[in-house]
Image: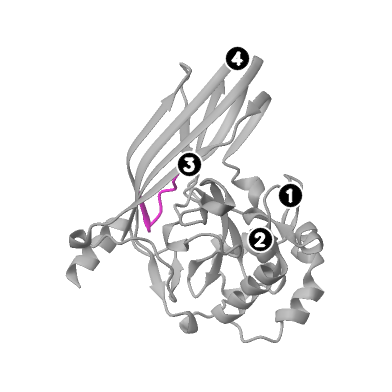
Amino acid sequence: MVRIELEVELTYDIGEQGADFVFNIHPAHTHCQKVSLERLLLSQPVSPQVQTDPNTGNRYMRLRGGPGELRILYAATVELLHHRSEPGELSEVPIHSLPLEALNYIYPSRYCESDRLLRLAMNEFGQLWQGHSRVQAIEEWVRRRVTFTSNTSNSNTSAVDTLIEQVGVCRDFAHLMIALCRAVNIPARFATGTDYGADIALGPPDFHAYVEVFLGNRWYIFDPSGTAVPMGFVRFGTGRDAADVAFATMFGSVVSYAPVIRTVALEDREAGVSLPHHCLQALSTDSGMPYDAQVQALGRT
């Protein structure tokens, strides 16, 4: 088990007409992720609505801010219980056998133009052994060809743009890997969280984009940018690409400031809580059983 203390602080200056916001900064409730001790502080007297998407578990907070400064402080404790698998045992699922939840993630999307990368993907990966090793080959291919460089892309940068420019940030790495996976009929989705374990030389702690790929009967984590520690990822949302799970979407005249992110991993060996670390096993965000049942099962072993 991994336990993370999370804090997110956001600051905005809102114009005279006010503005509407949609946030995705609340960690999702999943079979592998338990959220507790949540605290939300707002500098304005507004009433936020937090709603959960029943299909993804994504939690969205909506509010309308008035003119002036709006500061948001969200804090929570998150416990992670990943399902672990040996990579060599994970196979790809034929399209005719995919569950409905995975079908949506084999098609092109706004930032992942897999239909434009079919020939490239088949030439590079079409003849590889199908399974986790092929997905890992795609991840490593992206990592070799794209250089992580801050401030080199924008909200319009797509997978094809990243392939051409060969520079980008975590979001761009994720879009390119997703597009290449879909081009060889492997369901892949965009995931957001925080960059636990990232080198401070890359900048202060920040939001992070990574990839989840459907193998066997679960979604498994991949981090094509290679900048953080996947075992420490607190998942906020999953979607087809970044358009579905932006951490903040604003409607109105708004000036935004850099977010302040804090993630601290806690260790409690007696309780079975360990620090996040790189491992050779494949980590899944879906255990197939509720969180409490997993804890009980662990206690019996």
Vertical order, 300 against 68 (above or below): below
Residue matched to label 1: 153
Hey, which quadrant is residue 213 in on the image? bottom right
Residue at left offset 60%, top offset 62%: 225
Q: Earlier in the sequence, mark 4 or mark 3?
A: 4
Instruction: Look at 70% across and 69% down and name the residue there.
Output: 180
> Rounded to the nearest whole Å, what is the CA distance between mark 4 and mark 3?
25 Å
Q: Residues within 10 Å of mark 4 (few under 14, many from 20)?
A: some
Q: Give the residue number, with chain letter if any, for mark 4.
A: 67
Q: Nearer the viewer, residue 32 or 273?
A: 273
* Residue 238 visible somewhere in the drawing: no
Label 1 is placed on what type of residue? Ser
Q: Quadrant of the C terminus?
A: bottom left
Report which residue position mark 3 lands on: 261
* Image: magenta residue range: 25-34
- Which kind of residue does numbered mark 4 sit on? Pro
Secondary structure at badge 4 equals loop
Residue at which label 2 appears: 173
Q: Quadrant of the N terminus?
A: bottom left
Q: Is residue 84 above or below residue 65?
A: below
Label 2 vs 3, first from the N-terminus: 2
Upstream in sequence: badge 4 or badge 2:
4
Nearest to the observer: residue 26 or residue 139: 139
Q: Marks 2 and 1, how far apart in space? A: 11 Å
Q: Residue at x 72, y 44 (%)?
A: 155
Amino acid type at circle 2 is Phe
State how far apart marks 1 and 3 are (Cα): 21 Å
